[in-house]
Amino acid sequence: MNSYHETWQWIYVTGALTDNPEFLSQINQTLILFSMGVGLVFLIPLGIKRIRHSFFPSMLFFMTGMSIFTKAAISSLAYAAALAYGGVELSYSTFTVTGAMIPGLTSLVLVLLLLVIAMFGLFSFLGRRLWKAFYQDSRTRNWFTAYIALSFWMSIVLTILVV
């Protein structure tokens, strides 16, 4: 029997087996807000001019903060989309859960997708502003924005593939 289970796997299985339809949205909100809070811990030092104008520390704080800030929303979106549209079945001990067993899954996918798109817009904007501290030309700023977009959307694709 498989004894290792992902956090979101457990949450979606529990969401399907519980009688409380609000459980899934509440746990999603809690974990996403917690992830955003921890991500902000890494983004706050960018408010200090000395760190913001130092290339390597600012890039480290920015990319780490972005990764942690978006992790819970992207993981939850990947599991919700895989269950709703990918025909994935989650096995947890002796229980097997499909997307049809979770009420409101398609609306949850839509909300999570909008949240992830908003996060993408936020980090694209912040990345462009941060890059202006180092280089004034728009060509390198566009390349950095493309790097942010690629790393952001590749994390979603890789998370969906792992589910």
Image (cartoon, rainbow, N blue to C red):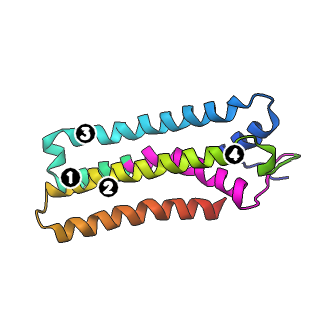
The image position of residue 16, as x and y in percent, is: 78, 40
Q: CA distance from mark 4 to mark 2?
A: 28 Å
Within the magenta stretch, is there residue 112? no
- Residue at x-position 84% and y-position 46%: 93
Q: Residue at (21%, 65%) from the top-left corner?
A: 141
Q: Disc 1 to disc 2, how far (Cα)? A: 9 Å
Indicate the quadrant where residue 42 lies: top left
Find disc 2 in the rendering and name its residue. 124
Range drawn in magenta: 66-93
Q: Is residue 105 visible?
A: yes
Could you tell me which secondary element the residue under label 4 belongs to? helix
Q: Principal SS element in the magenta part?
A: helix
Q: Secondary structure at mark 2?
A: helix
Nearer to us: label 4 or label 1? 4
Which residue in the structure is indicated by mark 3? 45
Choose the circle earlier in sequence order: 4 or 2. 4
Q: Earlier in the sequence, mark 1 or mark 2?
A: 2
Q: Which residue is tagged 4?
A: 105
Inspect the magenta stretch and tell me whether residue 70 lies in it.
Answer: yes
Q: Which residue is disc 1 drawn over?
A: 129
